[in-house]
Amino acid sequence: MQMKFICNNLADTEKLAENLADIISENGAFISLIGNVGAGKTTFTKFVCKYLGIKEKVTSPSFVILNEYKSGRIPVYHFDLYRLEKEGIKSIINEMEEYSEGKFVTFVEWAEFSQNSLPFDRVDININYLGDTKREFCLTSSGEKSGNILKRLEQ
Ligand SMILES: Nc1ncnc2c1ncn2[C@@H]1O[C@H](COP(=O)(O)OP(=O)(O)OP(=O)(O)O)[C@@H](O)[C@H]1O
Ligand SMILES: [Mg+2]
């Protein structure tokens, strides 16, 4: 299943993030974020975390690879694979499969590095830059859990 949203500004992006947060707060989700530098991967993650009730400051984990936020309605794991080499990515993917099966929300930035080898049920979010504040969010599900999330988002 695939859905597209045009966000004309930050407020639209925040609204989409709020809707998604409400849906995933109970059973979790594995979300991979694909898009160029400055597309809005971290911005979108921050907004979803806000509506999951995360109190910690959400920052891009570019240097530390993984941030964990435990203060909200559900544990959140935030990966950034940007600085990982191929070997590092391989080992982290095995670890990620466990995250995709539990009641967690997992975000993976720069997931196009690993897109072909992510074998589990997830929501892929492609963010395309259309202008200063305009973005296209393209959401694709790859299994039952992620498909149900998109169905609810459509309503
Ligand atoms: N509608 C919008 N949705 C998301 N971000 C927007 C929007 N309009 C403007 N922006 C701005 O675009 C920038 C996106 O930067 P962000 O760090 O989130 O990108 P990123 O995809 O995580 O980049 P990187 O690859 O460097 O991690 C922010 O400064 C944000 O305020
Ligand atoms: Mg980022």
Image: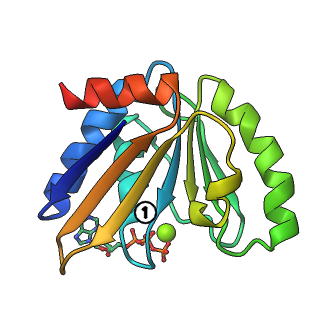
27 lies left or right of 62: left
Observer-nearest residue: 143 or 32?
143
The quarter in which the N terminus is drawn is top left
**Hey, which residue is sitting farthest left in the picture?**
8
Residue 145 position within the rendered picture, expressed as x and y whole percent measured from the top left: 50, 23
Ligand 1 lies under 8 Å from the Cβ of mark 1: yes
Observer-nearest residue: 35 or 13?
35
Residue 58 can be seen in this image: no
Identify the residue at horizontal 32%, vertical 53% (top origin).
138
* Residue 100 vertical placement versus 67 (above, below): above
Observer-nearest residue: 102 or 119?
119
28 lies left or right of 139: right
- Residue 110: which quarter of the image? bottom right
Residue 87 position within the rendered picture, expressed as x and y whole percent measured from the top left: 88, 67
Residue 147 position within the rendered picture, expressed as x and y whole percent measured from the top left: 42, 28
Residue 141 position within the rendered picture, expressed as x and y whole percent measured from the top left: 45, 37
The quarter in which the C terminus is drawn is top left
Identify the residue at horizontal 48%, vertical 57% (top origin).
33
Q: Give the crowd class for mark 1: few <14, some 14-19, many >=20 residues within 10 Å.
A: many
3 lies left or right of 133: right
* Residue 7 vertical placement versus 2 (above, below): below
- The residue that label 1 is drawn on is 41
Tell me which amino acid carries mark 1: Lys
